[in-house]
Amino acid sequence: MIVPAVHYGRDGLVAVALIAQRVTSEKKSLRELADALPALAMIKTKLARPDEAWPRIAARLSKTFAGMDVDEADGLRFSRGDEWVHVRSSGTEPVVRVIAESPGAARTRELVDQAGRALRDGD
């Protein structure tokens, strides 16, 4: 967990403290709190990075996910409602990292596949 108000590094102790605070303040078990969270399916994968400039790739991705909100802070993150897909060129490997999440495994796979097609469409 990263809590910017504390610092920008991953911090397991902060995560444990926040969970303990929630269990205490809501007077519920950890299981009860977890069961109240939405069930989501996530896929993380790496795809081959096309041999072309990122702005061209980004334009195809933006067209593919038109109608979704976009965040360009770290790659491209497209979101709408309870689904999102994040596409980011690796700084260390010739790959593009794709992470997607939605309430259903089939829809999450579809988001990843759409991103993959957008990456390949420039070939």
Image (cartoon, rainbow, N blue to C red):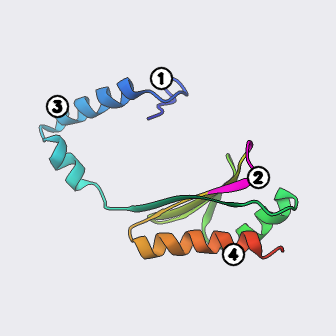
Task: Name which residue type carries label 4.
Answer: Arg
- Secondary-structure class at tag 2: loop
Task: Name which residue type carries label 2.
Answer: Pro
Residue 24: which disc?
Answer: 3
Q: Which residue is mark 2?
A: 94
Q: Is residue 66 magenta?
A: no
Residue closest to the eye, 105 or 14? 105
Task: Name which residue type carries label 3.
Answer: Thr
- Secondary-structure class at tag 4: helix
Q: Position of residue 117 (x, y in %)?
A: 69, 75
Q: Position of residue 56 (x, y in %)?
A: 84, 65
Q: Position of residue 33 (x, y in %)?
A: 21, 47
**Counting other residues with Cα less than 10 Å from the Cα at mark 4, is it few (<14), some (14-19), or many (20 or more)?**
few
Q: Are marks 1 and 3 in contact (CB under 8 Å)?
A: no
**Counting other residues with Cα less than 10 Å from the Cα at mark 3, is it few (<14), some (14-19), or many (20 or more)?**
few
**Counting other residues with Cα less than 10 Å from the Cα at mark 2, is it few (<14), some (14-19), or many (20 or more)?**
some
Q: Are marks 2 and 3 in contact (CB under 8 Å)?
A: no
Task: Name which residue type carries label 1.
Answer: Val
Magenta residues, start to end:
91-97
Q: Which residue is mark 4?
A: 117
Q: Which residue is mark 1?
A: 6
Quadrant holding the N terminus: top left
